Amino acid sequence: MTDYSTIDFSALKPLTADEVVTHSFVRDVPLSDGRTLALVTLDNGRDHTRPNTFGPASLLELGRSYDELATRASRGEIHAVATTGKPFILAAGADLSKVGEIPSREIAKQMAQLGHLVLSKQAKLGVPSFVFINGLALGGGLELPLNADYRTVDASAPALALPEVFLGLIPGWGGTYLLPNLVGIENALKVVIENPLKQNRTLKAQDALELGIADALFPSVNFLEDSIRWADAVVSGTVKVERKNTPSKIERMVKWDAAIGIARKMLEDRIGTVAKSPYAALELLKAAKNGSKEECFALEDDALADLIAGDQLQASIYAFNLVQKRAKRPAGAPDKALAKPVTKVGVLGAGYMASQFALLFLRRLQVPVVITDLDQARVDKGVGYIHDEVGKLAEKGRISSDEANRLRALVTGTTDKADFFDCDWVIEAVFEELSIKQDVFAEVEKFISPDAVLATNTSSLSVERIGAKLEHPERVVGFHFFTPVAVMPLIEVVKTLHTDEATLSTAMVTAANLRKNAVITADTPGFVVNRVLAKLLGEAMHAVDSGTSFETVDKAMAPLGLPMPPSMLLDLVGLKVGAHVLDTHHAAFPDRFYRSENLHKLAEYGTLLEKDAKGKVKGFDKGALKILAGGKSPMKETEILRRLENGLADEIHRMLENEVVAAVEDIDLCMILGAGWPFQMGGATPYLDRVGASERVFGDTFHHPPITGVGA
């Protein structure tokens, strides 16, 4: 077994060149009965906008501090060691910018080994070790306390998580061994795998306490003082720490392997088998059942080194930077000062989608919302849905009963569009037919202010043509949501040739106030997401119509790593919608987009996938397979994938040439946020570069240099 203390870590020195070092400041704190606690405070000297992170220099300094404290403990000078962070922040883990610069697998492994060496020193101090989790604790910032004997948490800590698999990594500084052996395998699976794959969900302080990650929770006002008093009581023996979730021998025998098996099936169903990090984490959690601490730490070293050296991490870092940086500064966004105030929202429509819009505007903007439809029954149903959803939020404790009552009072319904007279923002969510959208806009324009914004949620129609009958087409903008509206983080903001800067600015500011990421696109069929997905679905239907089974098509396209295969995507969006999307793109670009007559027949039939009573897919419907039968030229998986890759590379290249968006990064941002394209793929274009499709199609790459792993 590797002795970490014998490793020469000098090869990591180049990574420290411009590291923002998180320093370790030590001071003694008196306890009762003459005992002393040494308190280590982590602080990188920056304000709260730059959290503490661990690069090599930071880890080495912390390691030296722990070594000195171990020496002092051996002399009887201190009786406990506690580590905490600067105000509101413990640590955000490894410095991702440094991880992205690691030049080889060997250096990557040393970074894993250094983290293990330093953080595990807390178990060898010779006195009890504590971590006072005083705020943000992510990745290695949560593994730091896991390596200690005891943990307290600030009640207002905003986020605790092990998000590594979301980024193409694994918790590599002890998390996959320490966590399941502390809180049980099912809880560990939730934190390590399930939460990161649910839009990177995090834990609150109370969650950490209930799971057993933290032993005690204290309010912010006296968190440090209370934590020190609690540590004093633990050291003196007056407080006994009990951990109800620590796995028993019976739990290990009965639950562990079963939980791993269930998690593996869940992963295969939800994300396929292309993404490497979730499965690597799963294997490490499985090993933690019987493996020793030393054995499991060594497994983490190798797993982390393999992932850092691979393509998927570099693509993940690219994707992470898009979401964290580019999405916050949208390309082409006008000055925010031009935005008009939105003090009342009108929603044209009261169906399911329209009601979701109304609920989102209501919750996020906290302004009056009025909805309308063809008759009072539809209006009442829409208002009732919104009221019910507000009630559910109150029942779950996400809003107070007073706030629920206030939100309900802000919602009104009407069949008279004259009631929209004082709306600053009107969004339509009516049937996807050009004439209908034109007519509802023309009708409502008679009653609203000339300055009011008219937004359309069309997914494929021309926004300019939707506003063609208006006196003020300059106030029309596309505002394309993705379903489910409350969850999906993207809005495509579509600018026509007439859209003025004030309207565009209002749309961008409104999207931000809705807590959505907005990307500005040109007014072109399908905008970004649907145009790319139309190419994918078109190639799928082309192969099926040629005589290829849907199972083969699904399998052929699996290497893209998309959240679901084409058959399930069609089922999700709806067969009629899928046929409409393909028709729209075929009409616009008949030489490049496929139109499937069989898909229209399938839409009339109404079913593609057979499901059980709980909605779980059992297989393909026999009637659907009869409709799709008849093709005489079945295609091989490799042929299908090659056609799709080339088609995507060609279409995205054309979109960039035609300035549908400002840059290639915006294409990938749209696909990640709007279509769930995995972080590990980095969006569409890094994948197309890696597989050679870009070179095959237009003799170049989307990225210079291409986004590949350290060994490439």
Image (cartoon, helix red, strand yellow):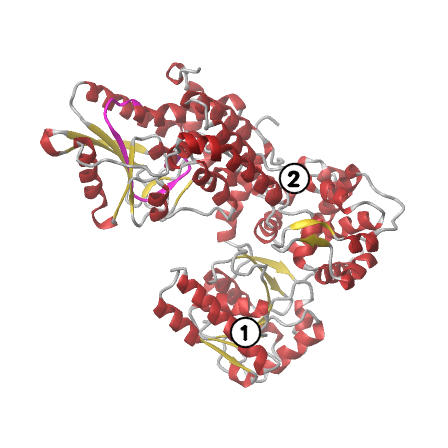
Image mark count: 2
Residue 456 in the image: x percent, y percent? 61, 69
Mark 1 lies on a secondary structure that is: helix
- Amino acid type, residue under disc 2 in the picture: Tyr
| Numbered label attached to residue 478 | none
Question: On the picture, is 408 further left or further right than 708?
Answer: left
Residue 226 image-quadrant placement: top left
Q: Is residue 154 left or right of residue 184?
A: left
Residue 189, x across and y down, in percent: 47, 39
Instruction: Work out whether mark 2 precedes mark 1 in sequence or the reverse, and give the earlier one.
Output: 1
Name the residue tied to disc 2: 687
- What's drawn in magenta, residue-wise? 124-141
Q: Amino acid at mark 1?
A: Gly
Callout 1 crowding tier (Cα within 10 Å): few <14, some 14–19, many ≥20: many
* 400 or 543, nearer to the observer: 400
Q: Residue at x 48, y 60 (%)?
A: 512
User: x, y (%) of residue 266?
Assistant: 57, 42
* Mark 2, secondary structure of its residue: helix
Point 81% across, 47% down: residue: 543
| Residue 134 in magenta stretch | yes
As drawn, 655 above or below 693: below
